[in-house]
Structure formats: C-alpha cells, structure tokens
Amino acid sequence: MRLGTLHLGNHLVLAPMAGISDTPFRQIARERGCGLAFTGLMNAEGLLRKRGAYLRIERDDHPLSVQLFGSDPEVLAEAAQWAEEIEADAVDINMGCPASQVIGIGAGVDLMRSPEKVDRILMQVRKALKIPLSIKIRSGWDNQHINAVEISKIAEDCGVDGITIHPRTKIEGFRGRADWNLIGEVKRAVHIPVIGNGDVTAPFLAKGMLEETGCDGVMIGRGALGNPWIFSGRPSGSLEEKTSMIHHHFSLIQNYYGEKNSAHQIRKHLYWYTKGLPNCASFHSRLSHLKEKEALFEAIHSYFESIQMRELCQRSASEEDISVIG
C-alpha cells in the first residue's frame, strides 16, 4: 500500500488507541507484520505545550503516523509541522473520535458536522506539511446525517493522501455492526487510498473487508489487544507463545517507561492476553489487586499452569474413555 510518498510493506494498520498504542505496543505489532502504526490520539495544543515530554519517536519506531485532534486550523498545522520535524512519517487528523472530552472542544467527529471547517483545517495543515497527511472519520453524526462520502471528497480536494473510515456514527459509538458497505462507497467516491476500520477481530475478517469493500488497507484496533498474532494472519497464540510474548512485551515496557511504571503498564495488557481463556474472570479479579512485577508474573504463570493441567486431565480422561470403548 502507498500513502502519498510513503510506501508500506503491507495493508495492515494498527489503530490509534489512546493509552494503548504506545511505543512498546507498536513494536510488538510491527514484529508480527503490521505495515503502519499510529500513535494514540494526541491533543494538538497539549503536544505544542509539552513537545518532547508528550511525544518522542524512537529510531526504530517507523513507519509511524502521528494522530492529532483539535479544532483550530493554525494549532493543528503547527503541531503537525512539529511532528514532521521529529521525523514522523505521516500525520493524521482525527475527525471520528466520539469521546465527550474530544467533541466538547469541537474536535473529533464533531468536525464532520461542519464541512467548511474541515476544509479550512485540511487546507492549513496540508500547506504546513511535506510528509503524507491523512484523516480518520466516521459515518457521520447520526443516521440522519451520514456524510462520510462528502467529507472524503473534501479531503481529497484539499490534497489529503488517505482516508480511514470507521463506519459507525457518533451516536452508535462502538455498538452495533460496522457498515462495511459505506467503506466501499467511500472507496468508489475518491481516488486516494481508503483504509477500512471496524469489527476486524480475526484474519479472515481482514480479508473479508478487503474483498467486500475494495479498500486499500485494514486498520485493526480492538482485535489486536492481547493478540498481535492477528497481523501475522493467525487467530491467536498458544499458551507458550502468550507466555513468551508477555515477557517480551514487559521487557519493552520496562526499557521504555522504566522500572517504576512497568508493572502498571503491563497489567492492562495481561487482561487482554488472557481474555477468553478458561476461568479468566476469576483470574482478572485476582489481577486487579496485584501491583508488583513479581506478583503479576507469579499469577500469570500459575494461571497458565492451571490451564495446562486442566487440558492434560481432559486428554487423559478422553483417552481412558476411548480405551474402555475399545
């Protein structure tokens, strides 16, 4: 896939998830085959105030797109310019976030209610940047105001290099089913790359989105939580692979955040790495009370051993049943 002057290794993209898509998580995703990663959602004004304390880009953290939100064209342009100066590979303007603290300042999906403002913002940011510029949008504000195609055409006319669409409205949030048909409509309406997003929780669904919509790329968000193997075309990792991945992930977190904050950072990922496993609810309840690294890893190893023991007992019982029948 190509995004302006940026050539990507494949069509799989890691979504900009606030508080999740950090440097260690992006590295994990890339190691498993992710072609492009986004930073978590970043306030353009906050980025300009805190600069390096708010965002730093490691030497190996590429290709990387910095996703910004805001409503002031000049502030967004300046923040985008600074992202380019610290060697971001692309900049993305969020026009799809439904969070109240984002739409409360006239940003995120609230921008889709004002096409004229979208035009002003994108013209200003495009003038400030040499690197590729993209946007992320939703279907619209509600079912009576579906305007993703209109906003996409405006973006193309402003020189934007690509569009990601999550085909749910602001009112829907993350409920219901994503309307993949709208991804196809946007793709047919513009000549720039379109990345589809929404309800891709397994490799076969990524393939299905590409085939059904004709989109150029697939953005994976919640489907990658605890499951970076999705970028390798696999549904999930084995217990042994999960154990190895958890240790690797923790090591990356520790190197990036330091010893003090590493246990807190890995704990949220442990919920996702174990989601759907036998008796995970009771394990998650136990996990919430653990604060130290040693206690966390003792708990995860004990939990995985209990699952393996259970599977061994089930196999033994099954073999005994077969022996009796024979």
Image: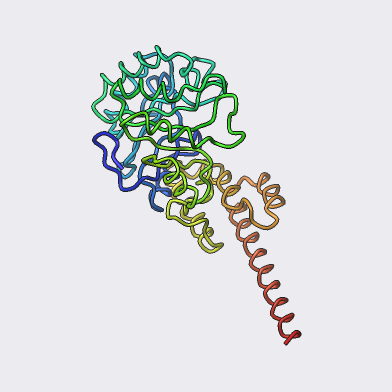
* Residue 284: x %, y % from top left: 67, 48
Residue 319 sits in quarter = bottom right
* Residue 13: x %, y % from top left: 40, 42
Q: Is residue 240 left or right of residue 277?
A: left
How many labels were placed on the picture? 0
At a point 59% along the width and 24% down the height, the residue shown is 171
At a point 37% along the width and 25% down the height, the residue shown is 51
Q: Nearer the viewer, residue 94 or 261?
A: 94
Q: Nearer the viewer, residue 185 or 117?
A: 185
Q: Is residue 12 left or right of residue 285?
A: left
Query: For the view shown, which residue lies furthest in the right direction?
Result: 324
* Residue 157: x %, y % from top left: 30, 21
At a point 67% along the width and 74% down the height, the residue shown is 315
Residue 161 sits in quarter = top left
Q: Nearer the viewer, residue 231 or 254?
A: 231
- From this view, report whether residue 79 is shown above or below residue 86: above
At a point 43% along the width and 32% down the height, the residue shown is 185
- From this view, report whether residue 45 is shown above or below residue 236: above
Q: Is residue 326 left or right of residue 21?
A: right
* Residue 134: x %, y % from top left: 35, 29
- From this view, report whether residue 310 is shown above or below residue 167: below
Query: For the view shown, which residue lies furthest in the bottom direction?
Result: 326
The quarter of the image holding the N terminus is top left
Q: Nearer the viewer, residue 218 or 313?
A: 218
